[in-house]
Image: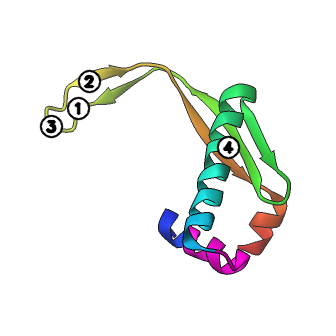
Amino acid sequence: MNKVELTVAVQKTLDSTKADAERAVNAVIDAVKLGVKKTKTVQLIGFGTFKISNRKARTGVNPKTGAKIKIKASKTVRFVPGKAFKAAI
C-alpha cells in the first residue's frame, strides 16, 4: 500500500472527501516526523513505536570497483510493531 492507497482507505473509512483524507494522512505523517525529531520516540499503543537508532561506522564495498570504503556513523528511524499489530498479521 502506498500513500495514495492509504488516502483512499482513510477517505472510505471517514466517509469524507479525498482532500480531507489527504490532509488527515499528511497531518499524521507530519506529527510522527515532528514527534520523533523532538522526543526521539513516538509510541502508538496497539500499533507500534517509531524510534531513532544509531548506526555505527563501518566498512563497505563499492559494488562497481570492489574497493573498500568507510561508511560514516548515522542516525536512522526504526519501527517496532506492537503486540496487537503483530497478532493481526
Q: Nearer the viewer, mark 4 or mark 3?
A: 4
Q: Which residue is mark 4?
A: 32
Q: Which residue is mark 1?
A: 62
Q: Is residue 18 above or below residue 37?
A: below
Q: Which residue is mark 2?
A: 68
Task: State the image quarter where residue 47 is shown.
Answer: bottom right
Which is more toward the observer, 24 or 64? 24
Q: Sequence-wise, which precedes: disc 1 or disc 4? A: 4
Q: Amino acid at mark 2?
A: Lys
How many neighbours does mark 2 have within 10 angstroms: few (below 14), some (14-19), or many (20 or more)?
few
How many neighbours does mark 4 have within 10 angstroms: few (below 14), some (14-19), or many (20 or more)?
some
Q: Amino acid at mark 1?
A: Asn
Q: Give the alpha-carbon distance from disc 1 to disc 3, as whole Å.
A: 6 Å
Q: SS of the residue at dot 4? A: helix
Q: Are circles 1 and 4 on residues that touch, CB within 8 Å?
A: no
Q: Is residue 23 above or below residue 19?
A: above
Q: Amino acid at mark 3?
A: Lys
Q: Sequence-wise, which precedes: disc 4 or disc 3? A: 4
Name the mark on residue 34: none
